[in-house]
Image (cartoon, rainbow, N blue to C red):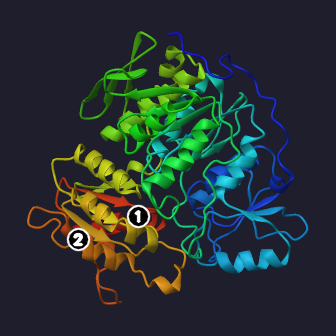
Amino acid sequence: MKAAPAGRAARGFRCPRPLPDVLIAPHVVDPHSPGMAGLASYLARRGARVTVAPQQDGREDELLQRLARAGAVLQPVVPGVTTALLWGGHGAAVHEILDRATGQGLPSMGYSRALELLGGTAPTVVAVVGSHSTTMAAAALTCALTARDPGWILTAAPHGDAPGYDGSGDVLVVDLCPDTALHEAAPPGWRHRTLGSGLHPAVTLVTAVDTAPPMFATREDALDDIEALARSSESVVVWAGQPGCDELLERLRRAPGPRVVTVGRGQGMDVQILRLLWSGEDHHLTIQAGGERVSLTVPIAGTTSALGVAAAFAAGWALGVSGSDLVDGLGAFTGAERSLTRLGTVGRVTVMESRAQHPEEIAADLQGARMLTEGAVIAVFEPVGHLRTGALAERITAALAAADHTVLLPVLSTPARPQLHLDGIAALASASDGVGGQDGGALVIPEPGPCEMGAEEVAASLARADDVILTIGSEGARRSGPRLLAALDRAAQ
């Protein structure tokens, strides 16, 4: 297949510019926050002296061990050596660390700003951006571009790989996921930094344009930011049919700008998905681009996830990679970490993980879980951010209604503005009135207290043979998976 060129179409080898001085010896405050492990891994592999805050109890979990193998050093800020703090927005002790760093005159920056600086050092940048649904597409893109040996900075690693990698090729793939918790304590009227400002990608893949507070308080905010990034790109690939993407296409067509490539299932797409078939274990796709057809098989559940792989194919095609090379690369793709990932099975009850946070992602992963069982689907859901949860409560509860039961974990959040008096759990409980019922979808809020059942015990008590328990969320959900397996094991004895 002859791919339409965009930017540097031929395979090249990178001649990267040196790392910015501010990123020569960074300290990562919260490595478990979205994207921070990928950022730390990439910087360490580029030769930066990366230090990572150790856990308060001194233990090294799997993620910290992986960062150490990538070259990061697990230790506090080194006075006189550390050049900046990288902060993803989570962590109970973060404010104390930031205060101490400010006293030492250290600059601090978030994930997006660090990506902008690093993007300026790469010959070719491919950005995956959206209000949601960037994770699977970005992870798939790193495999699709195998022929170019790309580097990448991701929020979730492809299965069996690292979230950050410094390839020998000329391409850097970055996942510009929106921040979900950093600005919980921002003052009223705070203007968040425009997503991806300062980047000039060769290709930008847009996965969705929707409300995603606090970053995008309205869809118009998302359209404004993502249109600005698209217009700073050589080519923009738009996943047609996703929320807000048709509106973005209308905007882009109003004035001259980047080359626009559409990908989707409808007629008239530049990259058309002709077939999407679920076999019970794999998705089989037939894709047409440039007048030729290719077929590929990916062992991932969930229609949206499979379409995300097709979107990654379209981004690679827009970059100028041949269809055969893209198919060969995607042949090694088996999904992204914590994206409908199976943790284990106890007594014929399967525990799976999802990192979904946006209502559209939640609905998509619950649909994917349904594809894997004839039993019930029980969600163990961790809301992210009181402000975000309150703003999206009705949409979140509507998405969770697809589960037979939903057990709520505490809200993951930096302290919200005290004058708002928001409680994400209360907002979900209020929004759930009238949602669900006898056929499922009911919210279960565990009672606090040392003598009460925890969320994992409650979920285990609801499960029967052939059911799936899906943990959904960030930090609490990640920790909940092993606890669920232990609770199921105790119940089986």
Give the quarter of the image for residue 179.
bottom right
Instruction: Say which residue appears at 33% left-offset and 49% top-offset.
Output: 365
Residue 333 shows up from this direction:
no
Residue 187: give x, y in percent of width and height.
59, 76
Mark 2: secondary structure = loop
Residue 126: give x, y in percent of width and height.
62, 34
In terms of depth relative to the viewer, which is nearer, 250 or 470? Answer: 250
Residue 25: give x, y in percent of width and height.
82, 57
Instruction: Say which residue appears at 54% left-offset and 72% top-offset.
Output: 184
Residue 2: give x, y in percent of width and height.
53, 10
Residue occupied by mark 1: 482
Mark 1: secondary structure = helix
Separation of marks 1 and 2 at Cα, in angstroms? 28 Å
* Residue type of the residue flagged with mark 2: Ser
- Taking the image as shown, residue 239 lies to the left or right of residue 69, namely left
* Residue type of the residue flagged with mark 1: Pro
Residue 14 shows up from this direction:
yes
Instruction: Say which residue appears at 30% left-offset and 72% top-offset.
Output: 428
Quadrant assignment for the C terminus? bottom left
- Taking the image as shown, residue 349 lies to the left or right of residue 126, namely left
Residue occupied by mark 2: 432
- Taking the image as shown, residue 426 lies to the left or right of residue 27, namely left
